[in-house]
Image: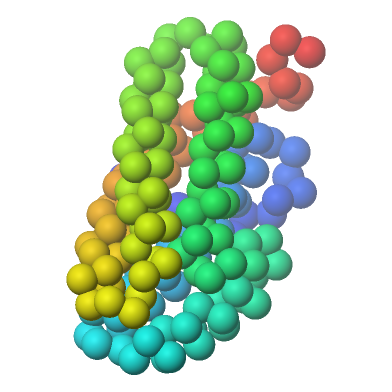
Amino acid sequence: MPAPAEDPDPRTPALGQHLRWVHAMLRRDLASVRELAGRVSEGAAVSDVREELSALETRGPLFQLHAACLGYCQLLHSHHGGEDELLFPAVRRAAPHLGTAVDRLEADHREVAAVLADIERLADDLDHEPSRRGLVDALNLLSTGLLEHLAYEEETLVPVLDGWTSWPGQ
């Protein structure tokens, strides 16, 4: 699996480069949330967790995470929704041979959405130890699945997107 691009320039007109740029930010903030999950797992005090969540809210101009997990979940829902509604239909039209790959990406989005729902529910209940343990497990599951998804999406779609000089059909 190729290493992800480090903070690609979002002003580059190539859509593939833009996708890698967004994915780099998703990976960066996922690492921050996983680090926090590790501290929760080790028994961090609720007040310390809330303080870290507040710090995460102010980091990063694009994400400005709202209570870290919840903001990240919403962003990911929006990103995947945009891909499902706009990008994937365009890829199907422009590159029909990628139909099976797009099917897999859409299925990944549904799986990620289910994990995000768990994270949202558990992040609202940090005062209870079972929720804290469940949040750590859900974040680890998200991390594994999402990193695989992002790598596959880049490997599959970036070569096609980099060839587009305009949106297909325009």
Above or below, 70 against 33 in this view is above
Name the foreground residue: 115 vs 14. Answer: 115
Q: Quadrant of the C terminus?
A: top right
Q: Residue at x 64, y 67 (%)?
A: 64
Q: Is residue 76 shown to the viewer in this render?
A: yes
Instruction: Report whether 40 appears left or right of 94.
Output: left
Instruction: Report whether 76 appears left or right of 82.
Output: left
Q: Quadrant of the N terminus?
A: top left
Image location (x, y in percent) of residue 140: 27, 61
Above or below, 126 against 20 in this view is below
Instruction: Report whether 151 appears left or right of 23.
Output: left
Image location (x, y in percent) of residue 104: 34, 25
Name the foreground residue: 166 vs 146. Answer: 146
Q: Which image quarter: residue 38?
A: bottom left
Name the foreground residue: 91 vs 155. Answer: 91
Q: Is residue 151 shown to the viewer in this render?
A: no
Task: Tell me how many marks there are.
Answer: 0
Q: Residue at x 28, y 76 (%)?
A: 128
Q: Residue at x 33, y 53 (%)?
A: 118
Above or below, 124 against 105 in this view is below
Q: Which image quarter: residue 168?
A: top right
By what rule are the colours in the image chosen?
rainbow
Image location (x, y in percent) of residue 58: 65, 77
Q: Residue at x 34, y 42 (%)?
A: 114
